[in-house]
Image (spheres, rainbow, N blue to C red):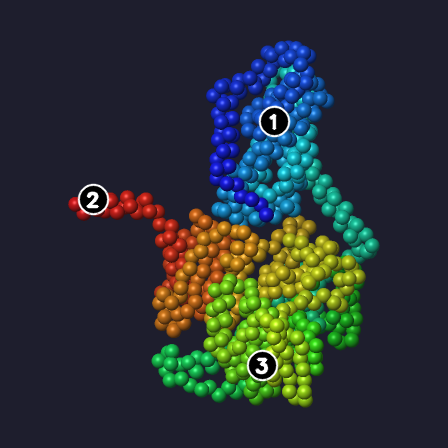
């Protein structure tokens, strides 16, 4: 773990550096590092070198290290002096090592003095810079070192603010500065002919250095082309393509990718083996939110006294409720239908797709016809499926998932009397609360120590209290051991704290996560790397630059809106990547858990900040103070904003409360475009609305940062005006 510099040590180094620089200028030492002084004293210096060669070489080396370490003017003159005194070979060796050592000392000084300070203030921006440096830092440093017109002291300073390794900095600096060192030392061997150091860098030499600076980029592009050729070497590229793009999967990602391609007038084929709309429409977001809305209404009727009305006892017609869910799916389905996308210009094929090579897709159609399409690019958007844990006896007892529960319950006249939910993530908690409000006796079994493990403890505690109030029994720290069946009686056996417990159930719902669909698409034959998801780069490219992955199959975030966001980038890069590629930005990615109250989050939360060692300042605004929340009898929850210390820039926001997902949108916009809390405070919000909470949170931050000195002067000013 990196140790932070103490203020005393930082001050000591600052004094030492300042003293060295001040001494240099106060004693007018820069006069000795001038071109005129060097030419005038050349003979005397040569005599000294002849008399004491080692002492002169050592003194010269130490002086060069000091000048570069302190970023003092004079390195150019010392380079000339090296050639004049020691010749090309020895002079180059001395300058090469001395300049690299001095640059490394300047690099370390900048890091020691400034890195911690800037990290506390601009932590997330530095992290983005560090990620780029980790990936390409050595390359960019080498390129900058090749161009002597770029101030080397500035390179030392900027690189010191990153996490580039010291050894890497030294080695790359020595290699990159070598051509420039040779030029100056060689010029020094001809010192008598030089009238001015500016004459060293002739226009032709400047052009040569510029070309030298371009060389690494050209070399990098050539290496990339070579790697690409090797990847494709065993495949025969078609002479022409029947499609610009083939998209596999018609879920959120596939629909967006094909829509973008059709809008851009590309010839695109969309292949889907199941229902159009994918999991979100048919099994996930749409049916679950429809169920939660009905459950919420039943809950409000039972608690009508909160609104000044008599409590009711709603008779839940579960068959009608499930019919409503089917009608909602049917109402939305035309938006994702085959007919609509064909009307947009998309060639929609119902069937199973498999990659034969990087440009050929074989489609086994539902009509029994198999055909092959050649395409310039491919987007794999196959989605994910629910994970079913390997629990002994689970198959015999029967297990439902978020995909199968809707069909299984569609013919029931009442919700299952006893429902066990495995997993207390967002899906498990949403469905547990929904079915509990509809009349089921619900038990949630979670192996972790608390529900909603990704959320902050206070957020999870709010959700825990809400679910418990609705009658859900939450068993955390419990591991499912096995399922047992005796006729129609089914039991789940769990273990926690060394003791076993038996839970009888009528239905068992697994909600322990989702895994990417990776089988049957020919990925293994092509050698496309997979883990839990398909491995892609920042542009969503796989091993083959023309094959992309987007959505749940690419990860790491399994949200419908993320799938759409990735799909736009994948489609644009697939169609125009030869001209310009767009890196996927998920820095302001929102997520919402639709329990009651809702939990919405963007950026980092406190738990993530502590795990990653990110300094932050917390602003907490309770919704019990919000007028609209009070009028709607939903005055519970809070807005929690994490900002940089001493700055209004937003690191992350968590909202717990009514319509938290909608309230979050303002913060997502602010983070995406670099707007701070001052901008939110300066925006007019309609009264009375829930979104006023955002402005109140910003106002709370502002009060905590009120300028005490200015306010004191203002008080004195107004006091005088009263007399």
Q: Is residue 445 visible?
A: yes
Residue at 75% x, 73% y is 365
Q: Position of residue 302 (x, y in %)?
A: 43, 83
Residue at 58% x, 45% y is 2
Q: Which residue is mark 1?
A: 65
Left or right, 296 with respect to 329, comes to left
Q: Kindly indicate whether the residue at mark 3 contacts the one at mark 1 (C-beta within 8 angstroms).
A: no
Q: Position of residue 587 (x, y in %)?
A: 55, 55
Query: Cα distance, mark 3 to mark 2?
Result: 72 Å
Residue at 78% x, 52% y is 231
Furthest residue in direction left, as rendered: 723
Q: Quick check: 664 above or below 309?
A: above
Q: Quick check: 51 above or below 695?
A: above
Q: Position of residue 299 (x, y in %)?
A: 46, 80
Q: Which residue is mark 2?
A: 720
Left or right, 601 with respect to 270, comes to left
**Residue 509, picture quadrant:** bottom right
Left or right, 519 with respect to 298, comes to right
Q: Position of residue 257 (x, y in %)?
A: 64, 62
Q: Earlier in the sequence, mark 1 or mark 3?
A: 1
Q: Earlier in the sequence, mark 3 or mark 2?
A: 3
Depth check: give the residue in front, 573 or 518. Answer: 518
Q: Which residue is mark 3?
A: 419
Query: Cα distance, mark 1 to mark 3?
Result: 74 Å
Q: Kindly indicate whether the residue at mark 2 contacts the one at mark 3 (C-beta within 8 angstroms).
A: no
Q: How would you rate the neighbour count of disc 2 (Cα within 10 Å): few for under 14, some for 14-19, many for 20 or more?
A: few
Depth check: give the residue in front, 607 or 408. Answer: 607
Q: How would you rate the neighbour count of disc 3 (Cα within 10 Å): few for under 14, some for 14-19, many for 20 or more?
A: many
Q: Nearer the viewer, mark 2 or mark 1?
A: 1
Q: Is residue 332 visible?
A: no
């Amino acid at each position: 773990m990196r140790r932070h510099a103490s203020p005393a040590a930082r001050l000591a180094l600052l004094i030492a550096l300042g003293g060295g620089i001040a001494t240099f200028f106060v004693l007018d030492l820069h006069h000795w590092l001038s071109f005129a002084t060097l030419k005038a004293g050349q003979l005397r210096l040569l005599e000294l070198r002849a008399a004491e060669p080692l002492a002169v070489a050592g003194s010269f080396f130490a002086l060069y290290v000091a000048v570069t370490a302190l970023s003092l003017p004079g390195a150019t003159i010392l380079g000339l002096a090296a050639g004049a005194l020691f010749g090309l070979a020895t002079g180059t060796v001395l300058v090469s090592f001395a300049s690299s050592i001095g640059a490394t000392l300047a690099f370390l000084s900048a890091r020691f003095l400034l890195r911690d300070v800037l990290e506390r203030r601009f932590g997330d921006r530095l992290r983005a810079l560090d990620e780029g440096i980790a990936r390409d830092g050595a390359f960019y440093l080498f390129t900058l070192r090749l161009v002597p017109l770029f101030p080397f002291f500035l390179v030392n300073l900027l690189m010191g603010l990153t996490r580039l390794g010291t050894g890497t900095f030294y080695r790359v600096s020595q290699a990159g500065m070598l051509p420039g060192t040779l030029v100056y030392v060689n010029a020094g061997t001809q010192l008598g002919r030089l009238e001015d150091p500016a004459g060293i860098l002739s226009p032709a030499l400047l052009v040569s250095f510029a070309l030298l600076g371009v060389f690494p980029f050209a070399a990098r592009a050539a290496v990339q082309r070579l790697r690409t050729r090797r990847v494709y070497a065993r495949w025969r590229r078609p002479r022409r393509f029947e499609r610009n793009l083939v998209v596999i999967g018609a879920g959120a990602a596939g629909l967006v990718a094909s829509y973008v391609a059709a809008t851009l007038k590309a010839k695109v084929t969309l292949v889907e083996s199941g229902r159009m709309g994918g999991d979100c429409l048919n099994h996930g977001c749409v049916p679950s939110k429809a169920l939660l809305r009905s459950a919420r209404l039943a809950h409000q009727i039972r608690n009508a006294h909160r609104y000044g009305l008599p409590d009711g006892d709603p008779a839940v017609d579960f068959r009608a409720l499930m019919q409503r869910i089917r009608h909602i799916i049917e109402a939305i389905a035309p938006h994702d239908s085959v007919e609509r996308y064909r009307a947009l210009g998309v060639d929609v094929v119902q069937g199973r797709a498999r990659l034969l090579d990087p440009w050929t897709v074989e489609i086994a159609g539902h009509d029994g016809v198999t055909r092959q399409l050649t395409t310039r690019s491919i987007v794999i958007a196959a989605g994910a499926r629910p994970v079913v844990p390997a629990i002994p006896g689970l198959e015999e007892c029967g297990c439902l998932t978020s995909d199968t529960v809707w069909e299984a319950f569609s013919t029931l006249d009442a919700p299952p009397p006893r429902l066990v939910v495995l997993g207390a993530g967002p899906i498990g908690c949403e469905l547990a609360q929904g079915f509990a409000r509809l009349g089921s006796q619900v038990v949630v079994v979670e192996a972790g120590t608390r529900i909603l493990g990704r959320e902050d403890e206070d957020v999870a505690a709010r959700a825990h209290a809400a679910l418990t109030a609705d009658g859900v029994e939450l068993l955390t720290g419990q591991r499912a051991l096995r399922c047992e069946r005796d006729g129609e009686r089914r039991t789940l056996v769990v273990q926690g704290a060394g003791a076993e417990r038996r839970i009888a159930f009528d239905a068992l719902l697994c909600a322990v996560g989702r895994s990417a669909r990776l089988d049957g698409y020919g990925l293994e034959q092509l050698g496309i790397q997979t883990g839990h998801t398909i491995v892609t780069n920042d542009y969503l490219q796989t091993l083959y630059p023309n094959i992309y992955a987007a959505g749940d199959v690419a990860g790491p975030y399994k949200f419908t809106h993320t799938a759409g966001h990735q799909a736009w980038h994948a489609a644009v890069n697939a169609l125009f990547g030869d001209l310009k590629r767009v890196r996927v930005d998920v820095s302001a990615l929102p997520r919402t858990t639709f329990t009651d109250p809702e939990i919405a989050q963007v950026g980092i939360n406190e738990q993530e900040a502590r795990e990653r060692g990110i300094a932050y300042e917390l602003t907490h605004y309770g919704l019990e103070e919000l007028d609209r929340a009070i009028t709607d009898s939903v005055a519970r929850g809070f807005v929690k904003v994490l900002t940089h210390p001493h700055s209004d820039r937003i690191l992350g926001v968590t909202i717990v409360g009514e319509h938290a997902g909608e309230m979050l949108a303002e913060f997502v916009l602010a983070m995406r475009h670099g707007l701070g809390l001052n901008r939110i405070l300066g925006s007019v919000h309609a009264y009375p609305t829930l979104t006023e909470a955002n402005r109140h949170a910003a106002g709370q931050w502002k009060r905590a940062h009120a300028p005490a000195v200015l306010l004191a002067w203002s008080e004195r000013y107004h006091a005088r005006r009263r007399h």
